Image: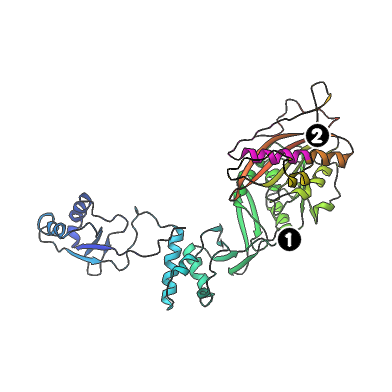
């Protein structure tokens, strides 16, 4: 966030209106005209041309009076309320917020300080007429005596009607955001994303703008005729793109946050796809579905590992399907990544039974098939993807009582979640041994 909160002094040369153009031409030629502020008309009818005071000399003023416009009045003044020019470098929203809050605070007799300036929000999310502030702002003690009127000033500076402040996600399975409504009577907002309408209560439901690349990718997949299970549906982040754009025949959407379920049901309706989706409210680990899905979406971070067994359970037994597995993967900050199984932690969490595949004659073999992946953090991503593939292969065997083949199709970055932590998605193809690999069919549109 830029911290240019101090208002600079704007000096102007004042003259009669009829000499304005001559003055402007001269000041422009001498590179003395301040292009960041507008020419102002004063109450007495005179015109004030903002200038770069640090470069202006008495000699310049003398030239204006004697040579450029003989007989003109030429005096210097300080503009009390300078306005930015059309060509000016527009102040950032953060600078505007700082200036307006400072004015408002000082008008109430409170001394502005570096502590207050440093405590202004550094980031925010706009949801229509509601602005959601970051959690690390307005924590200093002096703010307390200025509430609730303070929030009206902040909202006005940011150009919104309602204001809320984000907290940390509550540490329970529903991932309910800890959001405080500061200004306004409700937290319901509407967001349009790739032609899909999402309505939700920001105080009760999560929404990540950073997932837009994955939502666009999901929307581009060809899912015509397919049944999909979305194990962590939320308000419909991925359920809706699968239905609206990817053409899925039907989606089973699982969600246990009651507030998200209310939003999801409404979003399905307003997007015209409610007849192609069934909502399963509750813990997806108790899901009764099985042998039904062509695809399973596991869109939970930092890890969807607890949903892996049920994901294997719902895949079609005859032909299998594709798992879209989300995960936060930590990079090694320049360290050389260790191979799988080289430390005790990995041995404990990532058993590595052989993955069974078949050759062109249908004979059982072991295969190391490497799909599409590319990034500076590729070693860490690939290391995790291989471990996940191994564990999914083991789970499939346990759930279905027979070996399955697995193949990594794609590892896709979604966003940087935190320093050295990447949110990625693994597309994993899973087929029972009795099923052949589909030929001539693009299962995944890259």
Q: Residues within 10 Å of mark 2 (few under 14, many from 20)?
A: some
**Residue plotted at (30% across, 59% down):** 38
Q: Position of 168 compared to 11: left or right? A: right
Q: Position of residue 46 (x, y in %)?
A: 21, 65
Q: Earlier in the sequence, mark 2 or mark 1?
A: 1
Quarter of the image where one finds residue 444? top right
Q: Quadrant of the C terminus?
A: top right
What colour scheme was applied to this rendering of the protein?
Answer: rainbow
Q: Which residue is mark 1?
A: 172
Q: Position of residue 374 (x, y in %)?
A: 61, 35
**Residue plotted at (40% across, 57% down):** 91
In the image as oriented, which residue stretches furthest toward the front? 343
User: Is label 2 or label 1 in front?
Assistant: 2
Q: Residues within 10 Å of mark 1 (few under 14, many from 20)?
A: few
Quarter of the image where one finds residue 23? bottom left
Q: Position of 131 compared to 109: left or right? A: right
**Residue plotted at (74% across, 40% down):** 341
Look at the picture and state if 159 lies above or below 417: below
Would residue 194 be visible to someone looking at this image? Answer: no
Q: Position of residue 301 (x, y in %)?
A: 69, 51
The magenta stretch is 369-390
**Residue plotted at (72% across, 33% down):** 443
Q: Position of 76 compared to 66: left or right? A: right
- Asked whether residue 246 is drawn in magenta, I would say no
Look at the picture and state if 427 lies above or below 132: above
Q: Which residue is mark 2?
A: 354
Task: Give the Cα separation between the discs numbered 2 and 1.
Answer: 35 Å
Q: Position of 192 compared to 77: left or right? A: right
Would residue 4 be visible to someone looking at this image? Answer: yes
Question: Mark 2: which secondary structure?
Answer: loop
Q: Position of residue 144 (x, y in %)?
A: 54, 75
- Asked whether residue 388 is drawn in magenta, I would say yes
């Amino acid at each position: 966030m830029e911290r240019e909160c101090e208002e600079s002094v704007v000096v102007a040369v004042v003259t009669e209106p009829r000499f304005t153009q001559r003055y402007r031409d001269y000041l422009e030629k001498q590179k003395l005209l301040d292009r960041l502020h507008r020419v102002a008309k004063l109450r007495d009818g005179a015109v004030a041309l903002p200038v770069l005071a640090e470069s202006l000399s008495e000699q310049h003023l003398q030239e204006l009076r004697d040579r450029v416009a003989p007989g003109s009045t030429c005096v210097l003044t300080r503009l009390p309320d300078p306005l930015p020019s059309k060509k000016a470098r527009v102040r950032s929203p953060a600078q505007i917020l700082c200036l307006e809050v400072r004015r408002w605070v000082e008008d109430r007799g409170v001394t502005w300080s570096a502590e207050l300036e440093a405590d202004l929000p550094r980031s925010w999310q706009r949801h229509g007429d509601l602005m959601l502030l970051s959690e690390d702002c307005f924590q200093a003690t002096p703010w307390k005596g200025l509430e609730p009127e303070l929030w009206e000033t902040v909202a006005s500076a940011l150009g919104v009607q309602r204001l809320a402040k984000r907290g940390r996600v509550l540490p329970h399975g529903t991932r309910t955001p800890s959001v405080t409504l500061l200004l306004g009577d409700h937290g319901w907002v509407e967001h349009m994303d790739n032609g899909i309408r999402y309505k939700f209560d920001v105080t009760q439901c999560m929404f990540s703008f950073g997932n837009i690349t994955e939502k666009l990718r999901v929307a581009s997949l060809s899912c015509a005729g397919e049944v999909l299970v979305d194990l962590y549906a939320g308000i419909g982040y991925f359920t809706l793109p699968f239905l609206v754009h990817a053409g899925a025949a039907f989606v089973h959407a699982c969600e246990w946050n009651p507030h998200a379920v209310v939003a999801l049901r409404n979003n399905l309706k307003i997007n015209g796809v409610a007849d192609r989706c069934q909502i399963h409210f509750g813990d997806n680990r108790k899901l009764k579905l099985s042998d039904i899905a062509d695809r399973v979406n596991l869109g939970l971070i930092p890890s969807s590992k607890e949903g892996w067994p049920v994901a294997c359970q719902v895949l079609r037994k005859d032909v299998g399907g594709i798992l879209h597995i989300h995960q936060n993967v930590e990079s090694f900050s320049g360290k050389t990544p260790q191979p799988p199984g080289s430390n005790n932690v990995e041995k404990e969490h990532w058993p590595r039974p052989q993955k069974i595949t078949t050759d062109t004659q249908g004979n059982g073999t072991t295969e190391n098939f490497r799909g599409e992946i590319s990034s500076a953090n590729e070693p860490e991503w690939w290391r995790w993807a291989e471990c996940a593939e191994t564990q999914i292969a083991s789970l499939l065997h346990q759930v279905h009582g027979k070996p399955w083949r697995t193949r990594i199709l794609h590892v896709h970055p979604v966003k940087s979640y935190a320093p050295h932590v990447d949110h990625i998605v693994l597309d994993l193809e899973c087929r029972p041994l009795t099923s052949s690999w589909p030929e001539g069919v693009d299962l995944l549109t890259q």
